Structures are given as C-alpha cells and as structure tokens.
Amino acid sequence: MRSQRIFHRHRAWLATAALAGMAPLFAAAPALAGTSATSTAPDPVGVYVLRVTPATGGDPAPVSTGTLLCGPDGGAHADPTPACDQLRRANGMVERIPEDPGMCTREYAPVRVTATGVWNRQYREFTRTYPNLCTAVRATGGVLFAS
C-alpha cells in the first residue's frame, strides 16, 4: 500500500513537471498563429513532446525529439497537419490511432516511442516499445513519429 502511494505521488510529480515544462509552448501558440501578443487567442487543442529512444541498454540519448502543436498545427514536427488530424480523430489518444498498413524490415533494433502532452486540457501519455523504428511509425499511424 505504501509503495503504491509513493508510485502515484511520483507519477503525479512527473506529470506536473512535464506540464510545467510545456507552459512555454502554450504561451508560444498565439505567436505561431500570427496573432498579436495582446489578443485573447485560445489555448492550442493539443501540445505534445514526441521522443524516440533506443530501447536497448546502450545510449539513452533520443534518436529524435520534437514538439507538436495542434490548433493551430505546428511545432518542430516534420508534418504537423496530418499528425494533428490523426490525433483529432483519436481525441488525442495515440493508442487509438489506426495502424498504417505496410511492410517493414525484420531488423531488430528496438525503439521506445513516447508522446507526452495535453489534449483539450487533459494530460495524455503514450509509451510503447517496438522492434524497430519502421514498425513504431506504422503502428502509430505512419505520421506521428516519422522523422
């Protein structure tokens, strides 16, 4: 019981820290939309930090990291509009994005993908490990974690 409380307290702290770290992204959203700083533009619908890291014991440095803003679509993502469209259809839940059918190599180079953020002011977190980057990209709709 005590260990569960500690786990939940630690998880709540991590969630708070993640959201606090994204506060500058919310503040930047009106500027990205091309509005003046004095306007009362609404918060973006979604803000995510997307990471791809090796899942094996070696180097924990991310293969790629980026931000995705939805409503208006933007951020440091290669193709934000299709990625945001997928998230809109899935109500911001990465696990609900349909798989993109197609072939991948059978190479074993495991990666962990993580999407941490806020959708309609609700905290969202997705973490999964896949056998390789191609499989990870396809399993999450083909756009979200594509470089």
Image (cartoon, grey):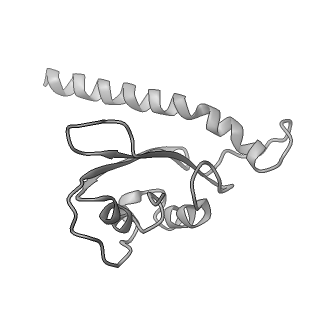
Q: Is residue 69 above or below residue 27?
A: below
Q: Is residue 72 above or below residue 134?
A: above
Visible residue check, residue 47:
no
Q: Position of residue 84 (x, y in %)?
A: 56, 61
Left or right, residue 1 beside residue 121:
left
Residue closest to the far bottom: 102
Q: Position of residue 90 (x, y in %)?
A: 46, 64
Q: Residue at x 59, y 48 (%)?
A: 76
Q: Residue at x 22, y 63 (%)?
A: 107
Q: Position of residue 122 (x, y in %)?
A: 49, 45
Visible residue check, residue 112:
yes
Q: Is residue 32 above or below residue 147?
A: above
Q: Is residue 80 above or below residue 52?
A: below
Please name whichever residue, 87 or 99, is drawn nearer the observer in this view of the structure. Answer: 99
Q: Position of residue 65 (x, y in %)?
A: 47, 44
Q: Looking at the rendering, in which quadrant would you find the N terminus? A: top left
Left or right, residue 98 beside residue 128:
right
Q: Residue at x 21, y 68 (%)?
A: 106
Please name whichever residue, 95 or 12, is drawn nearer the observer in this view of the structure. Answer: 95
For residue 82, which quarter of the picture?
bottom right
Left or right, residue 53 beside residue 17:
left
